[in-house]
Amino acid sequence: MSDSASAMPEHPPVTDWVHDFDHTDPRWTENPFPIWDELRAECPVVHTDRFLGCYLPTTYEAVKEIAYDTEHFSSRRVIVRDVRPEPTGNAPPITSDPPAHKPAKQVLLPPFTPDAMKKLEPRVRAICNELIDEFIDEGQCDAAARYTKHIPVRTIAHMLGIPQKDSDLFIKWIHEILELGIKDDDALMRGVHAMAEYFAGHIERRKQHPTDDLISTLMNARDKDGQPLSDLHVQGSLRLLLIAGIDTTWSAIGASLWHLAKTPADRTRLIAEPGLMPSAVEELLRAYAPVTMAREVVKETVICGCPIKPGNMVLLSFPAANRDPAMFPDADKVVIDRKENRHAAFGLGIHRCVGSNLARMEMTVALEEWLKRIPDFRLDPAGKVTWSEGTVRGPRQLPMLFAKAA
């Protein structure tokens, strides 16, 4: 994937983070943690005039308060961008407000239960090993390009019953929608329309030839009045599953491998004590939470003493909440056996992630299979780690060195 920053109209560099933050600034992309610390020390909610006006809550308390408040904050726009056309191409339930939200979410819950994940797990293990087979003899690889990217893409393709060979298309659309689309409206609409057309074709085919995959599950679902969901609703939910199910997990797995590559003590301990994997996964999710959502302010309110005005957006940074020392002791450290860990990596409130069981399972399997076969690895000093820009943060280039397979 090309470096997104070079394809985007440039924003002027930030000189005052407290009054003029910009989550697309290269310094934020590279290392947002000290920026969040600076902002949190100043104020629980900061504001910028960029993006037509946007707030950023910096504490766990402020993020939680906004996430639970559906009266003053709407989910009809979930990405902070340079423009705000009328919301189109909705992706229920993530873009739904009450009362439409609950029935739209309930339709999606059954395919993502822990039992459903247990059935899916062998396929995910096979995917991980197929990928590792392709580079293990080389002694080096870009783990983002050759491993972390493909695990969620192939998994979601398997669940949706769509061809694995279309994976590159999905990655292209996600890049256009989540990265380029922040500053380039044409790129956003190109991705949205291409995805809509793709899924419309699959929906039509299943009308003639029903299948037992997730697309047919949605087509067979009924709303609260017992009516089938409209094709547009099905398409929107499929778009959500594809976007939310790929970029986020790819980023979380990549950040976890990046951490383990530069922290040999944690890597050695995880291999020696495999029972720590569940708490390690939760801690890696907390420390490197990939997802920042957005809300639109629809009514004036006050959050943690800060007045909030309608017409602005809110950058709802779950990753910043997860680094709040008021909520987590040693918030800036990765403690893989952390006992108490009420992190917000999967969101808070009614929009908490439907696919959290899937993401946890994919992360666990991806790390277990990598550590089993490549226990000793490090970042390649000759390469450069690059991070994605915008709403979802994770490594997009992750050059690794390791011992060749015996």
Image (cartoon, grey):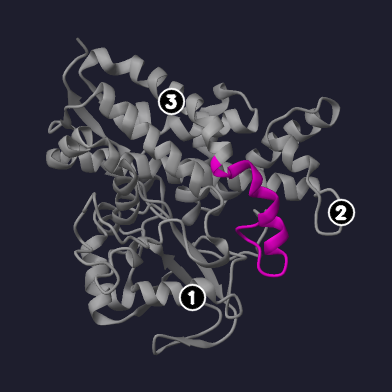
Say which residue appears at 54% left-offset and 64% top-offset.
83
Quarter of the image with the N terminus is top left
Q: Which residue range is magenta in the image?
A: 92-114
What x and y, as percent, mark residue 298?
Answer: 60, 79
Which residue type carries mark 2? Gly
**Quick one: label 1 or label 2, which is nearer the N terminus?**
1
90 with respect to 40 (left or right): right
Which residue type carries mark 1? Ile
Where 62 sits versus 268, above or below?
below
Find numbered disc 3 in the image and state the secondary structure of the residue it sits on: helix
Say which residue label 2 marks: 226
21 with respect to 331 (left or right): right
Of 196 and 138, the residue lying toward us: 138
Say which residue appears at 84% left-offset and 48% top-offset.
228
Q: Are marks 3 and 1 in contact (CB under 8 Å)?
A: no
Quarter of the image with the C terminus is top left
Say which residue appears at 23% left-offset and 31% top-offset.
399
Say which residue label 3 marks: 125
Where 285 sits versus 101, above or below?
above
